[in-house]
Image (cartoon, coloured by chain):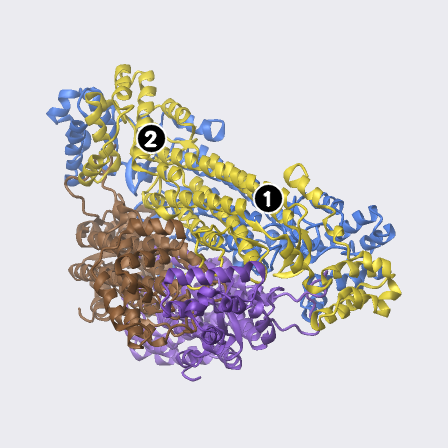
Chain colours: A yellow, B blue, C purple, D brown
Amino acid sequence: MIPRYSRPEMAAIWSPETKFRIWFEIEAHAADAMAELGIVPKDAAKTIWDKAGEATFDIDRIDEIERETKHDVIAFLTHLAEIVGPEARFVHQGMTSSDVLDTCLSVQLVRATDILLDDLDKLLAALKKRAFEHKDTVTIGRSHGIHAEPTTFGVKLAQAYAEFERCRQRLVNAREEIATCAISGAVGTFANIDPSVEEHVAEKMGLKPEPVSTQVIPRDRHAMYFATLAVIASSIERLSVEVRHLQRTEVLEAEEYFSPGQKGSSAMPHKRNPVLSENLTGLARMVRAYATPAMENVALWHERDISHSSVERMIGPDATVTLDFALARLTGMMEKLVVYPDAMQKNMDRFRGLVHSQRVLLALTQAGVSREDAYRLVQRNAMKVWEQGADFLTELLGDDEVRAALSEEVIRDKFDLGYHTKHVDTIFERVFGES
Amino acid sequence: MIPRYSRPEMAAIWSPETKFRIWFEIEAHAADAMAELGIVPKDAAKTIWDKAGEATFDIDRIDEIERETKHDVIAFLTHLAEIVGPEARFVHQGMTSSDVLDTCLSVQLVRATDILLDDLDKLLAALKKRAFEHKDTVTIGRSHGIHAEPTTFGVKLAQAYAEFERCRQRLVNAREEIATCAISGAVGTFANIDPSVEEHVAEKMGLKPEPVSTQVIPRDRHAMYFATLAVIASSIERLSVEVRHLQRTEVLEAEEYFSPGQKGSSAMPHKRNPVLSENLTGLARMVRAYATPAMENVALWHERDISHSSVERMIGPDATVTLDFALARLTGMMEKLVVYPDAMQKNMDRFRGLVHSQRVLLALTQAGVSREDAYRLVQRNAMKVWEQGADFLTELLGDDEVRAALSEEVIRDKFDLGYHTKHVDTIFERVFGES
Amino acid sequence: MIPRYSRPEMAAIWSPETKFRIWFEIEAHAADAMAELGIVPKDAAKTIWDKAGEATFDIDRIDEIERETKHDVIAFLTHLAEIVGPEARFVHQGMTSSDVLDTCLSVQLVRATDILLDDLDKLLAALKKRAFEHKDTVTIGRSHGIHAEPTTFGVKLAQAYAEFERCRQRLVNAREEIATCAISGAVGTFANIDPSVEEHVAEKMGLKPEPVSTQVIPRDRHAMYFATLAVIASSIERLSVEVRHLQRTEVLEAEEYFSPGQKGSSAMPHKRNPVLSENLTGLARMVRAYATPAMENVALWHERDISHSSVERMIGPDATVTLDFALARLTGMMEKLVVYPDAMQKNMDRFRGLVHSQRVLLALTQAGVSREDAYRLVQRNAMKVWEQGADFLTELLGDDEVRAALSEEVIRDKFDLGYHTKHVDTIFERVFGES
Amino acid sequence: MIPRYSRPEMAAIWSPETKFRIWFEIEAHAADAMAELGIVPKDAAKTIWDKAGEATFDIDRIDEIERETKHDVIAFLTHLAEIVGPEARFVHQGMTSSDVLDTCLSVQLVRATDILLDDLDKLLAALKKRAFEHKDTVTIGRSHGIHAEPTTFGVKLAQAYAEFERCRQRLVNAREEIATCAISGAVGTFANIDPSVEEHVAEKMGLKPEPVSTQVIPRDRHAMYFATLAVIASSIERLSVEVRHLQRTEVLEAEEYFSPGQKGSSAMPHKRNPVLSENLTGLARMVRAYATPAMENVALWHERDISHSSVERMIGPDATVTLDFALARLTGMMEKLVVYPDAMQKNMDRFRGLVHSQRVLLALTQAGVSREDAYRLVQRNAMKVWEQGADFLTELLGDDEVRAALSEEVIRDKFDLGYHTKHVDTIFERVFGES
């Protein structure tokens, strides 16, 4: 997480201010529940809210205490006592630091996920808009970077839409994974705290109680969460790589928007580089990298150790902030992407009809030619186009063996582009539920 | 995937025999659907099944053809034509290799997943059985490897159960991710093949049609699949590490079953090493490692490239076979795990009452002592136990400042183990729905 | 490691036959050294060699014994005793299994590395040959996939050569990392075995004694080894991606060799796909993936645990066999790469002189125009070329503000391609030591 | 890189101030070299140093310009022109942004590496000191977490020393990898800049010229660099895990230093947790994670793309700052580690002589008993110790079959601890060159 690749709303979730505010709420809600149980005086629970509910916590002061105690929750509680007064002794009754830390992390990840879901919604909206805009913009489909058969630019975008819709569903699942609350005490037995306290705090903080925690919320949840972000990042990379390819000098079928003031290169002023999509490719690598340490965190020793903590202090912000930034950047890039339908057509014409070879092959076999012979016939004419720059249709029409099987009309019919786009509506119906 | 860490049923899914059989079924079902559409003669579709439906494909012959053509699907189709005869020309009409390859991979992954789900069910059954067996076996809970508060061995196992139940749900989700079928032609436009063919094949092969494919099924699905296996592997590691800890010489609260003929060490015959759980730790690292290349596979170029193929030829078998082996090994290990309740009790008594310090602390604050003073009082006596081997209860009873706040009866009450296990039923209810 | 991506010589290193042969040699050399020390009768040491020096070990028999003992070294020693007879009791005196296993792994990795070094030498030779062949083949250099300034295809290959020469040096370093021998007993103290035995075995097996082992050779060595292979794989990916780009339909400046019998696509016979370089891209992902588990292996517990073993049983063969295959495939691909200088020239001419913009910019500033003004002037004319298809030279010659600073002769001189290649000799001298 | 895990000196290397200062030096040295070649007026080159050599660059102003131009180097050069005046037009002549950016990154990584080397030297010094202090402190060696044979705590530390000395050598190699300078222009051909400029800047900045760059310094260098940091991190994890094990409640042979003011747990005041070593375990996971994106950066497209940049903006600081912090923390932890020789002795005595079983086994075979029989005899008595708490020596002395082979004196001699430490000097000589 560096300012260059951060957006304020997401970064704020990971600020000390937010963290201490969440800590306070957990403690105060827990005190309420304990007051309900008669463990804590109701007045004391109320005083906690009254004195600190709107208070600003002094981060420097907390840091100062932590430097002495080397324990962050104790430092916070000590500072809280400075604000609340004697009733502070009822705070954190029977609780352990992890009850606060882990539940806080859950709240932060849930909030971060809600932003990411919103990011995905915006991306999906942009993709859908552009997909319908270019539903019928014919372009060459490529496999192995080689021209294959025609498709439309809208279908390309429909694919991206479907992929990010899957990402959205994965993220919904991942949100559920980490939306749990643990207030279960030192080893998760509720020895010193009633399970009803956990239930109350969970409800107030928008979480579910963790069925069985062992001081900590189990880290397989977080591993699954960060693995999901990593998969989403990989999909960002896919779309970014597509744009990078389309913007290549020789292809140039689409281009990132280039604002008037922007300079492409200090040395070559004519250059317009796909710097956003390249940047996204790199950011995707980073978000992906955070999954492995999250998985290595799972095998905590016995009921828990603290090795996961330093990892999460880093990847919690790093992964969510970077992914938020990347999704927003990708959305903006796709919204403004400059598309060149003429260039798409021009590129497709490059091989003088070769893209229709598959149809001719099929027509030959349907006319009774053996698959092997049909292949040989098509290949023979295709190679003339490829090597000598001939026109595929002309060659086929002049090939006696081909003509023995197919009439001129049939051959010409195989060069109709509409043939390739006839099921675009079906695809759009499948993806968008409309066409 | 090496024989040492393979089980036959899972390995068979990845054999050439299975692969070619699935390829055949996809092609033959597609021919049926095309016959229904009138594209292929119904007799021809029937002949394909009649001639090859029970045939054994000659793998050496297919390999031989592939060495010449350098293309595996063409090699298979050529061999199929040798079996089926002239009607073979109706096979693969308008289809592309990836239609066969990708749908086959889906079928293989679905079958593999069904085995893995079965593995998980067996593991869950074993964990549940042992959890109820040791529901009340008191043991010390540890954080940071240090004694914390009592819990029960059953609670430890309930945690493992809950974790693997989450893994099961994740695997169900992952199965859905990869259970799709693509028969959509060269760039996914259905130009040469009707969408109804895909629907028919999907239904017959137990899959759903891929909403939009681009010759290939998008690889974000596979990335999510292998990432899920990686998370499951991490949970295997967690339970294995727990067993390794419990079997340490100084702890020895549980031990892997040691069969009469087994030799622990060529040099030290008294040693019984936790070799299964150590082995599982290593296998978990491997399954985890396969997630990254699966994620790197997502960003295929344009409609597709073939870079994912070599990766999947390796991780497809490697990840599923290794995980299957690991789950089965873990299940056997947990079923036979030798548990030593006496040793658990003995270890817990090691610090002469110190595990009850938290309760005493709480009692002091509830008696009106400030949190800071209570902490000081408990720490003062705890240090005598720690450093001088004193007994915690005796020290507390002899501490005037403590006694000023708490009566002997109250102090003695804080040393009751039942206090720590009173919510075990609640936890079991949450995890197993029964207690 | 799957047959499809294996070469026999490398695969043989990892066969059971090779392993048991190395085990035998370690044991027999150790017996020699112990005979020298008087611990073992010299006759016995000789008998071991006489009886088993040429023997074929019965792998099925060893497997059978291992199934009972669950210990591979004991199984081997038992079988060895069946061959050697009573003198076998002098084998493995004071040694521990890891002495044999770890030293054997070192021998295998050293042999594998020697093959890989040979692979790299062949690749370097191929790259050098093609680099000199195309030293003066002018082609456009591209940054961000966008045309930048001219370079030569030979310079591209010189870069690849320099990169793989670095890889070679890294591999030499990595070989040194793992070329160590440990015969130090149960915890590495030499309690039961004299250090001179280790020295003797090390020398005979082409290794150095490990300064301090703890039953095992420390795994940071292996982590560094596999990390090095991962970096080499990444360089393979780079060159492969370059070829994939060059073979794109719109670029087509070079092509993988396409043998007469080879079929590109079952559906589109005109297609020639860069399947080798795409395959290499995938294989690179796999070799890279093995580095992480190797690093996770480093933190063995105390003097050792066995978690690394399952990992190494898999990545030892997988990483070396795959990398060997990939290097050989890359070498063949580069040797036979079909290069199209005419296409390179044609692509470069695509933007009608824009590649010279940087030179014009420089000339303007040298003529006293401020950097900002020069940039504006160049950009103004460049945009006409870009957007309207104008010719850059013509535009510049007709721009009064430009002409006020630069004469026609000077402007024309900036369009000389020789300007860009004048330091190719320098680069070749740096890389190859000759030009 | 977060403040919690940062040290100021290392963090300062990655500040904007440092970066712009290095950029300036590169540009100014390049101007000097160009002045020497007569391309730039000598006065101008001098003016650049005079006006900006001591200037403070206004980071806010540069950011402001970058927001408009979206190009960081142009923003810097524009600001530099504001400071230097008209002579600024001679700055950056024929250079490209990457010349500045990549060379700057090299300088930053070299400086970071020098700090890391210094960190390692301090760690090595601490390890050596503690190793000699505990050279003869006998402790049990453990394999699989199970007691094996005696060793000394000094030998454990000697192993760590040898491991980090290897890390140091690797880091020296890695430093050489990234200590290169590229001032070679837009695609690395030196078209617009003489190679002598690169040589001059390289020398002045403490680097070597990159033999062949392609606008960028090839990223295999950086991949190797970050992979090396990842291996070092793995060694940090190993030593940390060792300390965590030693501090376990049941083992407690060593403890992290616990300062008077420090609080171990908010709930259990008697707990002293190995929080430093656990923290280091997590930090190691992070440094390790950065290797993969660095490797994914290698395959830049053609002469370069910019996808590596976002990765390096993050992992450049993150990896070096975190590793610096971790090494310093580890050094402090090892310097102050509290070692308990009595506890080591007590743990070793736990199994009443079983640790000597290997010696007895050996003695039996040397007395002519077959290996299988000797194993049976030792195992028979060992099991009595293990299962019934008997004393191993007593059992052996009372076993007639054993006594038939070995005299009481010989048996007793096998229980001498000095036997196990007799080669500690040899090991120390090998590791430290002294003993």
Pick out the residue farthest to the bottom: C434
Camera-side residue of C182 and B14 = B14
Residues at marks 2 and 1, common chain? yes
Image depth: mark 2 or mark 1 in front: 1
Residue receiving disc 2: A22
Q: Circle 2 sits in a helix, a strand or a loop, which is it?
A: helix
Locate the C terminus of chain C and report the quarter of the image it occupies.
bottom left
Residue pictured at 38% horizontal, 52% vertical: B272
> Residue C225: where, in percent of width, then height?
40, 66
The answer to whether A57 appears left or right of A292 in the picture is: left
Q: Chain of mark 1?
A: A
Residue receiving disc 1: A130
- Count every numbered label the image shows and give the total: 2
Residue pictured at 47% horizontal, 67% vertical: C357
Locate the N terminus of chain C and report the quarter of the image it occupies.
bottom right
Q: Is residue A81 placed above or below C288 in the rendered structure?
A: above
Camera-side residue of C160 and D62 = D62
Camera sees residue B314: yes
Q: CA distance from mark 2 to mark 1?
A: 40 Å
